[in-house]
Amino acid sequence: MLKYCRLIATLFLLFTGPAFAQVTDFSSIPKSDLDKLLKNGQPAELGYSHFPLLGEYRDMHIFTINDSVFGAVPFRLFIPQAYDPSVPTPLVLLLHGAVGASHFSDAMGQHKATEADDDPFIGKLCKTGNIIIMPYGDATKKFSWVVNEWRPGDNLTFKTLLNIINEVKRSVNIDDNKVFAMGHSDGSDGAFALDIYNPTPFAGFLCYNSMLTNLAVDDIYLRNTVNKPLYAVHSDKDDIRPIEQARVIIKLLDSLKTNFKYKEYYGYQHFDKHLDLDYPNALKFIDSTRRNPYAKTLFWETASHLYSSCNWLVINNWDLTLNAAPWHKPYNTGSYYKNTKTWKSYPYYRINPSAAITGTYNNNTFEISTSRVTAFEVLISPQMVDITKEVKIIVNGKTAFAGKVKVDGNFFKKQFAKTHDRMAVWVAAVPVKVVYQ
């Protein structure tokens, strides 16, 4: 425990050491012309470059966005000097550790904007040519990606993290298919939670020395990890997050056929040199991984309207009193107690009942299976179906919809306004109600 306290204190000093001299409201910086073009009915223009130069905002700066829940949320934004606004650029959402020792007020200090030494990865990532977003956590304001301070309700932190990304996309030419969440320690738990709760905007997730959970939650539905690639690293001398627990979870992810890579380092502790040693592998993962927003197969499990969708499947309603389908099962492990180095039968995850949906599409036909879901939507893109032909949706073996889908320009505009995602283009939604016998 003493070693843990020292680690937290060290990270606290690193993170709260003099901060940047100026904090800017992000709404004041120049925006792209995409919103204007969209209002003029030019969706094809979304593929072109209409982004500002942002010359005075290159390198590291601190901005805030005004959030309806958390108020002014500060975040670091790094834009490389070589950034070309005509070229889509990858983005890394880097979540820092030691969230319990972090506060929004840490952003209001007094040191140069070029210093970025508080996280084991941010200094290196700023040399890659990618865009980096690094928010400040603040548990006192319930803005935490490692603990659900909103219990027993949903953690609203993750929605705000996506809002930050979406706001940055209004000014910076981000490659929508190259957006990653990454972190160490508490930061890695936040990245893992995004994989479970909000994977749609991301290409993949990088988790270093993670607990592979969030604290005080009851909705870690592990099978949701099948939708996006995951890169996980752990070290065997970690006395804060024991590797024994990580190993059984990784084995469980393997049984679920999650697309993941996992690497262990021997002889290293929680915050150690293995982070430097493995960093080239992180770059390889980022360079080689690209999102497909139109994945042929999806699975989604939820009991929250805040976390109700993945790519082209949206769960609108459910009835948890119904029997679960045979393929809809909870997944859990025992708990490893590091103080006694023993396993207990007490479940590692607290898991509430949920609803689930799985689907595939091919040749204008969607085949969907549901469990406790009573209403859902299928989002339609010309990249997935031939909209000049009939679309068929088969639910639990029965045809629920058959007909042509009309392109809805207003629907497209609303979707883009929410996400500023130019690569996931949805032109209509087909609502489906499910009746169980």
Image (cartoon, rainbow, N blue to C red):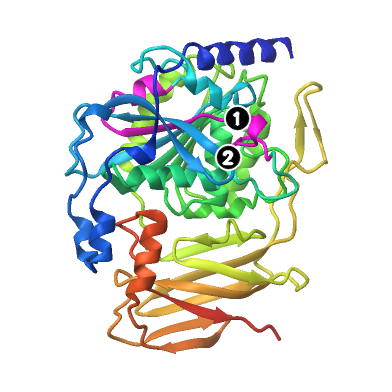
Q: Is residue 300 left or right of residue 128?
A: right
Asked whether, in this view, residue 352 is left or right of residue 223, the answer is right
Q: Which residue is depicted at the point 59% across and 37% down?
A: 145
Q: Residues within 10 Å of mark 2 (few under 14, many from 20)?
A: some
Q: Residues within 10 Å of mark 1 (few under 14, many from 20)?
A: many
Q: Quadrant of the N terminus?
A: top right
Res. 379 image quadrant? bottom left
Pick whichever, 216 or 21, lies toward us: 21
Q: Pointer 2: what residue?
A: 70
Which residue is painted at 24% across and 69% down in the image? Answer: 41
Say whether disc 2 or disc 1 marks the residue closer to the N-terminus. 2
Mark 2: which amino acid?
Phe
Q: Position of residue 100 (x, y in %)?
A: 64, 25
Tell me: 212 left or right of 410. right
Instruction: Please identify the quarter of the rendering in which residue 418 is found.
Output: bottom left
Magenta part of the protein: which range?
121-148
Residue extending furthest front? 28
Of marks 2 and 1, the one in the foreground: 2
136 relative to 10, above or below: below
* SS assignment at label 1: loop
Are the residues flagged by discs 2 and 1 in contact, CB closer than 8 Å?
yes
The kind of residue tagged 1 is Asp
Residue corresponding to mark 1:
138
Q: Which mark is residue 253?
A: none
Q: Is residue 214 left or right of residue 226?
A: right
